[in-house]
Image (cartoon, rainbow, N blue to C red):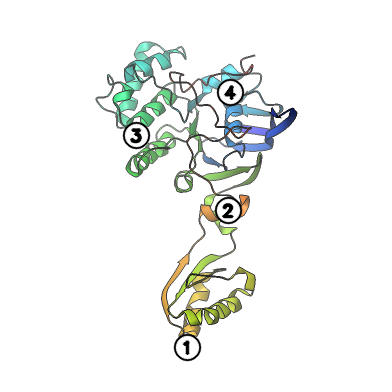
Amino acid sequence: MIRARGLVQTFSTRQGRTKAEVRAVDGVDLDVEEGEVVGFLGPNGAGKTTTLRILTTLLRPTAGTATVAGYDVATQPQDVRRSIGYVSQAGGAFSGARAGDEVVDHGMLYGLPRSVVEKRGKELFEQLDLPGLWTRMPRNMSGGQKRRLDIVMGIVHDPTLVFLDEPTTGLDPQARANLWEHIRALRERRGATVLLTTHYLDEADALSDRIVIIDHGRIVASDTADNLKAQVAGDLVDLEVADPLRLADAAERLVRLVDDERSVEVVDGHVRARVPRAGRAVPGLLRELEASGITLESVEVRRPTLDDVFLALTGRSLRDADHAPGPDGAAAPPVPAGTPTGTPTTTEGALR
């Protein structure tokens, strides 16, 4: 469904009198198979947003090739747009129009008859928990309702591939959980392939068949969440020692277990280290501590998370932000209000 090879995107920047070339995307190879839900993650400024803009024909790549839904993004942009749904982070519905009118106008841009679009749109309103809101204006909707409206606009033309850019940013936990169910339904009910960008690691973990991580313009990992977690060296064992005078003794025993003094951390009454197969090793450790008279206030064993994977691969945290920075570090501009979400705004000759 998506195949990219050697994608490069460079931008010229000026610092004082000096011109510099920035490689926002630096040789990206990416494959997304039909029916997959792929989480596309990266720190701010890593090249995630720029890659997405290339794949949705918003930018022409400086070098490399990419096909989306079987069409070349550089030479067949119109065919790409007919085949995809694009839900931007900023949203695409005009706040002063009626929701149903926005959906109908959007679908008719794809050449669909009004009657077909209206029928599909009202069915989607029911499926995405928007009953009775056909004539309501987006400005009078909740955040979750507006995001679901954006998704309706992005899929009303029945695309085979859907790009979701930060779909739950700014929503409360209940609205996020509700939207997750609807994102899952895009594949389960409609058979869509989904490329999802998000700053919420729990969201990527819950929704994605596979995680792709980009950093400094390059893909640094691509695998299932479970396989990526397995690459982190062991489970985190955290011992809270009751007597501060016995911290060194507890740390010494943990060092014996992991055979690496540098990997054991002593902080605020806690002794921590990553222990391979901790489920097997910890019972023996606890017996040894008890026999030595070392009392523990608590014991915690935590399996690796995507946060651990992300930090191990990039050395950075995946910060929540309203907009990922562009190539010069500034926020990437949102799609203007009123732009149909399934037809990305074209810039810098993308239509040529």
Which residue position holds label 3?
Answer: 144
Q: Position of residue 145 (x, y in %)?
A: 33, 31
Callout 4 crowding tier (Cα within 10 Å): few <14, some 14–19, many ≥20: many
Which residue position holds label 1?
Answer: 291
Q: Please report whichever mark, 3 or 1, sits nearer to the chain's N-terminal start.
A: 3
Distance from label 4 to label 1 (Cα)? 66 Å
Distance from label 3 to label 2 (Cα)? 30 Å
- Determine whether label 4 and label 1 are within 8 Å by CB: no
Q: Quadrant of residue 179?
A: top left
Question: Is 165 above or below relative to 313?
Answer: above
For mark 4, give the secondary structure.
loop
Callout 1 crowding tier (Cα within 10 Å): few <14, some 14–19, many ≥20: few
Q: Please report whichever mark, 4 or 3, sits nearer to the chain's N-terminal start.
A: 4
Quarter of the picture containing the N terminus is: top right
Q: Indicate the amino acid at tag 3.
A: Gly
Q: Position of residue 351 (x, y in %)?
A: 61, 15
Disc assigned to residue 51: none
Distance from label 4 to label 3 (Cα)? 26 Å
Distance from label 2 to label 1 (Cα)? 36 Å
Q: Please report whichever mark, 2 or 1, sits nearer to the chain's N-terminal start.
A: 1
- Determine whether label 2 and label 1 are within 8 Å by CB: no
Q: Please report whichever mark, 4 or 1, sits nearer to the chain's N-terminal start.
A: 4
For mark 1, give the secondary structure.
helix
Q: Position of residue 248 (x, y in %)?
A: 55, 80
Which residue position holds label 2?
Answer: 311
Q: Residue at x 48, y 47 (%)?
A: 201
